[in-house]
Amino acid sequence: MGAHTRNVLTVKGISSSKAAKLRDGGGLWLVTKGKARYWILSYTFGGRRREMGIGPLHSVTLADARERAAKAREMVRCGVDPIHEKRQALAEQPKAKTFGEYADSFIDAAVAAGRWRGGKTEARWRNMIQKHAAPIRDRPIAEVDLEDVKRVLKPLWGTKQESAEKLRECIERVLDAAKVEKLRMGDNPAAWRGNLEHVMHKPNAVGKNHHPAMPYSNVPAFMKKLSGVSGVSARALEFAILTCSRSGEARGAVWTEVDFKSKVWTIPAVRMKGGKQHRVPLSPPAIALLKEMKEQSVNEYVFPGVRDKRPLSDASLAKALRSAGGTAVTVHGFRSTFRDWATEAAHAPREIAEAALAHAVGDVVERSYARSDALDRRRTLMDTWAQHCIG
């Protein structure tokens, strides 16, 4: 098993030495391969010289290496080849799940549970996981790290920004679920706040006509211009922005959905994209706007259209948007604007911001926020958003 002298090396000596091969004794060596340093154990078994890898220096300390080497030497004395034993143990271990395998099963479970309405969401998820996340599909789910996430996001980042952000959220939710099932440990490398936000800054939307969302810093000035645009369409757009609602939800609002006493707008499931009732806490500016519309009410619709007993058309809100100077953005884009503001300016918890947008959120903890216990926390967030909007 080599020279009798052992434990020659010291931690300080290892860090100060640049030698390609350092001997600790008893067959234990520290060798340099490329830019990394690895522990190996040299021994004789059955008349043959053998070398067994013990691990890289950055994860296996000098003490650990000596302990593992001692166990291997004991095996040799007992007539067992450590390399054969190591391979046998690896062969008997269950195969680690890959990111692709786990992501596919995550989607299957979501579909089976009826978590998504219609097939569009499922198709989008499968396309993102199979196509855009292809470079990491074969990576063990436990080993997906920050560099892997950046690698799949960068081809889309800044060119297809909306797709890139949806892909990031998909990966984050898959990795969160894997952690709950104890298939991963540590922080989520796909998380935005306190993580990717520091290394993958969102492109500035100013002056880019193809970008659908307005930077949240521009919203107060835009809302001031919008307040000067007359007509029901402009008021409906203001209401949609203040409540972070979809165009159809705001345009279809009827007075029976509004409770002025509790300051809540309850949108029935039949009018929601997700097929679930959604309660919207109404901020003081939203209440003031509704009272203004109530004074001129002509039918059941909060924002009545030109035709009798018909809501406004989608085009009417787009026209109001252009009248206020919002030619480079879309009505729906204000939901993305709110989401950016909630994360970057308000530092709101992800589950609260997603609940404000009536998005279905991932695990059991997050889904609990879809119930009424999140209404007060969402009210605080919506009040702060309204304050930002009106400057």
Image (cartoon, rainbow, N blue to C red):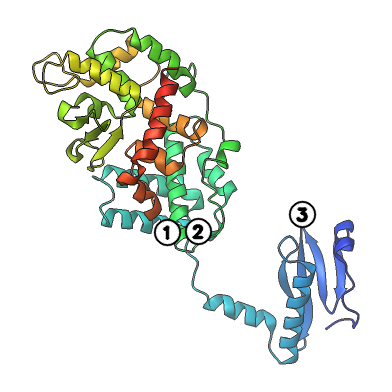
- Relative to 143, does residue 193 appear above or below in the rendering? above
Report helix, strand or loop for mark 2.
Answer: helix
Residue drawn at (20%, 40%) of the image: 269
Residue drawn at (30%, 44%) of the image: 372
The earlier-in-sequence mark between 3 and 1 is: 3
Alpha-carbon neighbours of circle 3 within 10 Å: few (<14), some, or many (≥20)?
A: few
The earlier-in-sequence mark between 2 and 3 is: 3
The image quadrant that residue 280 belongs to is: top left
Q: Is residue 310 left or right of residue 84?
A: left
Which one is in front in this view, the residue at disc 3 or the one at disc 1?
A: 1
Q: Which mark is residue 102?
A: 1
**Distance from the alpha carbon under mark 2 to that under mark 1:** 7 Å
**Residue occupied by mark 3:** 35
The earlier-in-sequence mark between 2 and 1 is: 1
- The disc labelled 3 sits on which kind of residue? Lys
**Residue occupied by mark 2:** 141
Residue 86's x, y, as percent?
63, 78
Return the residue nearer the eye: 91 or 119.
Answer: 119
- The disc labelled 1 sits on which kind of residue? Tyr
- Residue contact between numbered discs 2 and 1, judged by CB atoms under 8 Å: yes
Q: Is residue 260 left or right of residue 54?
A: left
